[in-house]
Image (cartoon, rainbow, N blue to C red):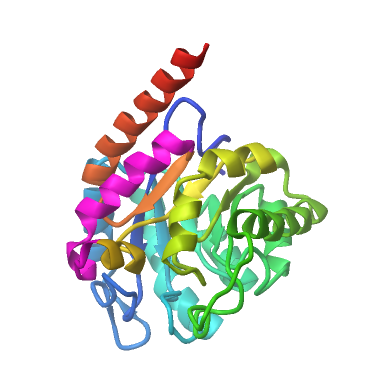
């Protein structure tokens, strides 16, 4: 296991996305043909590029969770993601994350070398995943998602999005703690784009520091190429990196501990600026 903390307080960490899927919304099909055939060497080359560009962590996923995506069988998800993680663990020292909602997939990925489990459902899909993380001493990132990816964008409603997301995440944290995951191994993600409309996403992006203070845990923000950025800029998914980097700077300024992105080069620079401005604001109030 990689030593804790994975998201140290002296930086805003950059998590690089590596999707071993045929259907992820902006980069699906880069390494996967059909359901399970994965070009592992191409994935390793892509991971090396993510690290060169400034990623601190590589997050590997074998199931798309884009809006409207259908769930895949755990065996298929494992066949896509685990060989990639195994190859990366032999080549790189950076922490590796498995992006999964399933305990079975998480367990196989940890055995292959992952030290982080990124569950976008916040343990609502498969609560047994918490026990897998606890037994392995893995870091667990708990995301916010109501429902499932297939239907999450069907008229999502919140009366108070900040309070409701915080309360839902508090429930996820309680489940993780009950399973034996220590606070030193927990982080939360407000789930930008996961069952949220534009105004919800903007409110959450503007308040990661508030969420950290309420929950007492590091906050990971994932704005990368999301449709709410397209709604603001008019850009297609493949053209949203500049808007993503702007969102990363804002997230860092507003208190995020990490950002999850497809293109780390600009994000790594953006979070340095955002964190410096956060420090300047705090010093100005001292």
| 128 relative to 16, above or below | below
Dominant secondary structure, magenta: helix
Quadrant of the image for the N terminus?
top right
* Residue at the image position 33 percent from the left and 40 percent from the top: 249
Q: Position of residue 106 (x, y in %)?
A: 58, 65
Residue 142 visible to an observer of this rendering:
no
Residue appearing at x 58%, y 73% in the figure: 157
Q: Is residue 250 left or right of residue 77?
A: left
Horizontal relation, residue 2 to residue 272: left or right:
right
Q: Which of 135 and 161 is in front in this view?
A: 161
Q: Farthest right residue?
A: 178
In front: 7, or 221?
221
Instruction: Inspect the magenta stretch and tell me whether residue 242 lies in it.
Output: yes
Residue 33's x, y, as percent?
27, 83
Residue 200 visible to an observer of this rendering: yes
Q: Give the quadrant of residue 105.
A: bottom right
Residue 117 location in percent, x, y?
56, 57
- Between 275 and 78, the one nearer to me in the picture: 275
Q: Which residue is at the far front?
A: 159
Q: Is residue 131 magenta?
A: no
Q: In this view, does 255 lie above or below 277?
A: below
Magenta segment boundaries in residue numbering: 233-255
Q: Which residue is drawn at 21% across and 50% down?
A: 49
């Amino acid at each position: 296991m990689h030593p804790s903390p994975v998201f140290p307080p002296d930086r805003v960490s950059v998590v690089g996305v590596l999707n071993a899927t045929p259907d992820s919304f902006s980069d699906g099909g880069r390494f996967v043909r059909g359901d399970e055939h994965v070009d592992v060497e191409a994935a390793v080359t892509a991971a090396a590029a993510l690290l060169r560009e400034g990623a601190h962590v590589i997050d590997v996923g074998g199931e798309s969770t884009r809006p409207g995506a259908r769930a895949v069988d755990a065996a298929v998800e494992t066949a896509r993601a685990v060989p990639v993680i195994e190859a990366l663990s032999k080549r790189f020292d950076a922490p590796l994350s498995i992006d999964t909602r399933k305990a079975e997939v998480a367990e196989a990925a940890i055995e292959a070398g992952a030290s982080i489990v990124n569950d976008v459902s916040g343990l609502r899909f498969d609560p047994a995943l918490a026990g897998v993380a606890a037994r392995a001493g893995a870091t667990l990132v708990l995301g916010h998602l109501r429902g499932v990816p297939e239907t999450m964008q069907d008229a999502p409603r919140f009366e108070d999005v900040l309070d409701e997301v915080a309360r839902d995440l508090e429930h996820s944290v309680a489940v993780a703690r009950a399973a034996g995951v220590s606070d030193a191994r927990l982080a939360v993600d407000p789930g930008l784009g996961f069952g949220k409309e534009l105004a919800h996403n903007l409110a959450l992006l503007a308040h990661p520091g508030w969420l950290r203070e309420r929950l007492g845990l590091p906050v990971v923000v994932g704005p990368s190429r999301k449709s709410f950025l397209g709604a603001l800029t008019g850009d297609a998914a493949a053209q949203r990196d500049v808007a993503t980097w702007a969102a990363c700077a804002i997230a860092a300024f507003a208190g995020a501990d990490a950002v999850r992105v497809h293109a780390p080069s600009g994000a790594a620079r953006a979070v340095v600026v955002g964190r410096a401005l956060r420090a300047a604001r705090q010093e100005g109030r001292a």
